[in-house]
Image (tube, grey):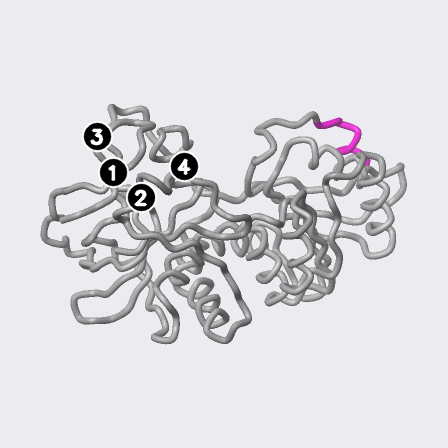
Amino acid sequence: MKAAVVFEKGSIPQYADFPDPQAPKENEMRVSVKAASIKNLDRAIAGGSHYSVSNDTHQPKIIGTDGAGYLENGKKVYFFSKKGTAAEKVNAEKGFIIPVPDELDFATASALPNAVMGSAMGLKFKAGMKPGDTVLINGATGITGRIAVQVAKLYGAKKIIATGRNEESLQTLLTLGSDEIISLKQQDEDFKSKIIDIHSETPVDIILDYLWGHSVEMLLSALKGNGTFSHKTKLVSVGGMSGDAIQLSSQILRGTDIQISGSGLGSWTKEETHLLFTEIIPEMFQAAVEKRMIIDTEIVSIKDIESFWSAEIPAGKRLVITI
């Protein structure tokens, strides 16, 4: 069969022949793949730099962790697999297969779940979001941040604040559910002053962060208490696009009612992961059918994977390979 394969760690995937998967095991089903989305996660796994990748000698590997296609009985499905998804045929574990509504296209079906994982899991399980909460999405102009804005809206947020550097993308977030946008390109003191003003008027219940680094340092500084009672805020780290480390004053932790946690592979319980596949993603698929959830995709043929692997994808779009 044909697949997009990385033959050496860190190399560009190639459109190449690859052995067909063996007969599905009892807990697996065969999927004829029609689309596979490619994310920063997939690039990190292919390059051997993601924390979920072992240090074992690299073997030729099919890229991708999300895909959509048909089961042998003709049913339309989404599936998740660490063994790769950008291939003509894949065996997927039954627990990681989700029915896809007939009205939903394969590109959307393959692209949406990962963005939902990176937003809904943090909001629902790590932050315990409730209807009426005020939510700040830090770094919302990326694809997952844009989905987070829409998920927060679906979950009943009273107010959604979005930060980011891409001015054009920030403006479009107002049409997706954001009530207020804040540029990260302004001076630090101006940014912190804006956060202080917002927090005093409508206290921030949840910060969902995709950046870490300096912007989080500024947010924590703006939320810092002054020795009186402070509003409880939950900060959930989902990404580290601006760096993997921050400077954190112990005074902030002692003087502020703030809870810091993370949401990502390895941080979810089996029960939470089960709910992701049985309830959360199906709910978001239906929202997409009803146009209450929008994800933009950049669609290319698997034959062109080499030329698009390192290409700059337009802001707010997910690369999807069609097969």
Q: What's the mark number on residue 59?
A: 3
Between the residue at mark 4 and the residue at mark 1, the CA separation in whole angstroms equals: 12 Å
Do the residues under discs 3 and 2 have CB atoms within 8 angstroms? no
Precedes in sequence: disc 3 or disc 1: 1
Report which quarter residue 130 is drawn in: bottom right
Residue, x 67% and y 52% (percent of image)?
Answer: 170
**To which residue does mark 4 refer?**
310
Mark 4 near mark 1, Cβ–Cβ under 8 Å? no
Contact flag, marks 2 and 1 (Cβ < 8 Å): yes
Instruction: Report the amino acid beneath label 2.
Output: Ile
Task: Assign the magenta stretch its main secondary structure.
Answer: helix
Q: Residues within 10 Å of mark 3 (few under 14, many from 20)?
A: few
What distance separates the C-alpha of mark 2 from that of mark 1?
A: 7 Å
Tell me the SS state at disc 2: helix
Report helix, strand or loop for mark 4.
Answer: loop
Compared with 1, 7 (above or below) is above
Q: Over which residues does the magenta segment extend? A: 248-255
Q: Earlier in the sequence, mark 3 or mark 2?
A: 3
Q: Looking at the image, tell me whether mark 4 or mark 2 is earlier in sequence order.
A: 2
Label 3 vs label 1: CA separation?
Answer: 14 Å
Task: Residue 10: give x, y in percent of width and height.
Answer: 34, 28
Quickly name the residue at label 2: 305
